[in-house]
């Protein structure tokens, strides 16, 4: 039997299954329930947050014989037939590989034909920003005067690359990145269904690594499951991702604060000897500086951080010993080193240089303050 990855196995089937996009699913359900359906939609947002999944659900919902509050029932003959990805009434086109004007002209010819056994024929054009200028011009005519039985859904991660003439003819929905809290709950539900043991902190680390993308989060979870076998633990997640424990980040920033040059050089040796990815480590240092700045300057910092209580308490305690301007400098220096780390022959030497550079900056800031 074919093995399905988690993101394929748990792809949402109804609007209620979609997480983090309630502002969009609610609007689409209302349109379907009221019959006020647009002829063209633009779904835009980062990768892996549900654009294509929502497009497929919408395509089934507008054709469902007994939709439930705007969602496909999944039981009628039409729903069952449309679940087949080869059904001729839902046409998915990858604009990255079908971006020529001839490809769009072919669409223009085919939209004239009525759907077979359904009310609407739905065209889902993914990565639509990849179309050529002449292909956009060819598509424009169809979007201006589409047949009543056709709905277009254009999906893209880069809406700014679309011509204004296309944008003005679509009902636009902007998809948001999904919060760590919602991704963690999704992982808990999936791991419970799969019978996989886990530590909640491990799932939170996976969700954080997914950076708001459901697909990326579930892909990482697949790797963790393959590595862990029996139980997903905090340690197994850190080993697979190459991420760093909070305590190491706290210790590093304590050394910076104390201007402990010897301690920093020993720490860099420890990180390098342990086999950690220094590029990932520096990225986490920049993020840690940002977290400290949030703790230092915001009224309800953990509403933003969503950190475990133990880690949050450590962040709050450490933030008290840093000046806001120094933390901003840490973010600038460490965050700006990403390209350098990509091409350097000695990541460890660059880590040492960055560390000494931010410490020197600390001294300058103190002198200015005094």
Image (cartoon, rainbow, N blue to C red):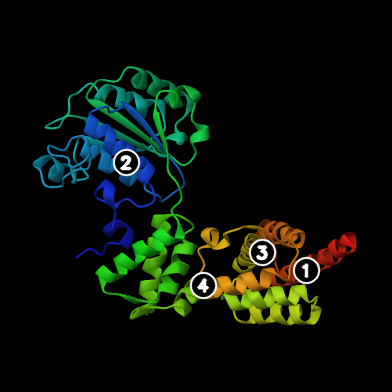
Q: Earlier in the sequence, mark 1 or mark 2?
A: 2
Q: Which quarter of the rendered picture does the C terminus lie within? A: bottom right
Q: Which of the 4 image quadrants contains residue 196? A: bottom left
Callout in the foreground (3, 4): 4
Q: Residues within 10 Å of mark 1 (few under 14, many from 20)?
A: few
Gap in angstroms between the C-alphas marked 1 and 4: 33 Å
Callout in the foreground (1, 3): 3
Residue toward you, 257 or 138: 257
Q: Give coordinates of residue 100: x percent, y percent.
A: 41, 30
Gap in angstroms between the C-alphas marked 2 and 4: 33 Å
Residue toward you, 267 or 310: 310
Gap in angstroms between the C-alphas marked 1 and 3: 17 Å
Q: Which mark is residue 26?
A: 2
Q: Which of the 4 image quadrants contains residue 305? A: bottom right
Q: Residue at x 73, y 82 (%)?
A: 266
Callout in the foreground (3, 2): 2
Q: Which mark is residue 289?
A: 3
Q: Which mark is residue 309?
A: 4
Q: Is residue 76 visible?
A: yes
Q: Earlier in the sequence, mark 1 or mark 3?
A: 3
- For mark 1, give the secondary structure: helix
Q: Residues within 10 Å of mark 3 (few under 14, many from 20)?
A: many
Q: Earlier in the sequence, mark 3 or mark 2?
A: 2
Q: Which mark is residue 353?
A: 1
């Amino acid at each position: 039997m074919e093995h399905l990855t988690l993101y394929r196995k748990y792809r949402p089937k109804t609007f209620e299954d979609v997480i983090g996009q309630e502002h969009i699913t609610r609007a689409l359900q209302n349109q379907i329930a009221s019959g006020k359906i647009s002829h063209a939609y633009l779904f835009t947002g980062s990768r892996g947050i549900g654009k294509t999944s929502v497009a497929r659900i919408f395509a089934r919902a507008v054709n469902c014989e007994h939709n439930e509050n705007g969602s496909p029932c999944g039981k009628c003959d039409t729903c069952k037939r449309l679940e087949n990805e080869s059904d001729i009434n839902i046409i998915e086109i990858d604009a990255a590989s079908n971006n020529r004007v001839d490809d769009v002209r072919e669409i223009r010819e085919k939209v004239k034909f009525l759907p077979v056994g359904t009310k609407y024929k739905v065209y889902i054009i993914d990565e639509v920003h990849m179309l050529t200028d002449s292909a956009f011009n060819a598509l424009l005519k169809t979007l201006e005067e589409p047949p009543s039985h056709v709905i277009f859904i254009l999906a893209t991660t880069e809406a700014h690359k679309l011509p204004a003439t296309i944008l003005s003819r679509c009902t636009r929905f902007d998809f948001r990145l999904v919060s760590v809290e919602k991704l963690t709950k999704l992982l808990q539900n999936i791991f419970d269904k799969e019978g996989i043991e886990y530590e909640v902190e491990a799932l939170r680390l996976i969700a954080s690594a997914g950076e708001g993308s459901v697909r990326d989060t579930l892909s990482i979870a697949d790797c963790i499951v393959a590595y862990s076998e029996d139980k997903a633990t905090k340690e197994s997640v850190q080993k697979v991702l190459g991420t760093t424990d909070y305590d190491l980040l706290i210790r590093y920033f304590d050394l910076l604060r104390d201007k402990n040059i010897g301690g920093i050089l020993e720490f860099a040796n420890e990180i390098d000897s342990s086999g950690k990815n220094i590029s990932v480590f520096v990225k986490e240092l920049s993020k840690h500086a940002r977290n400290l700045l949030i703790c230092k300057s915001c009224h309800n910092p953990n509403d933003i951080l969503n950190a475990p209580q133990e880690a949050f308490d450590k962040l709050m305690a450490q933030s008290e010993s840093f000046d806001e301007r120094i933390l901003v400098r840490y973010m600038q220096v460490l965050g700006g080193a990403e390209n350098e780390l990509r091409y350097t022959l000695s990541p460890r030497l660059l880590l040492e240089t960055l560390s000494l550079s931010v410490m020197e900056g600390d001294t300058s800031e103190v002198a200015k303050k005094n």
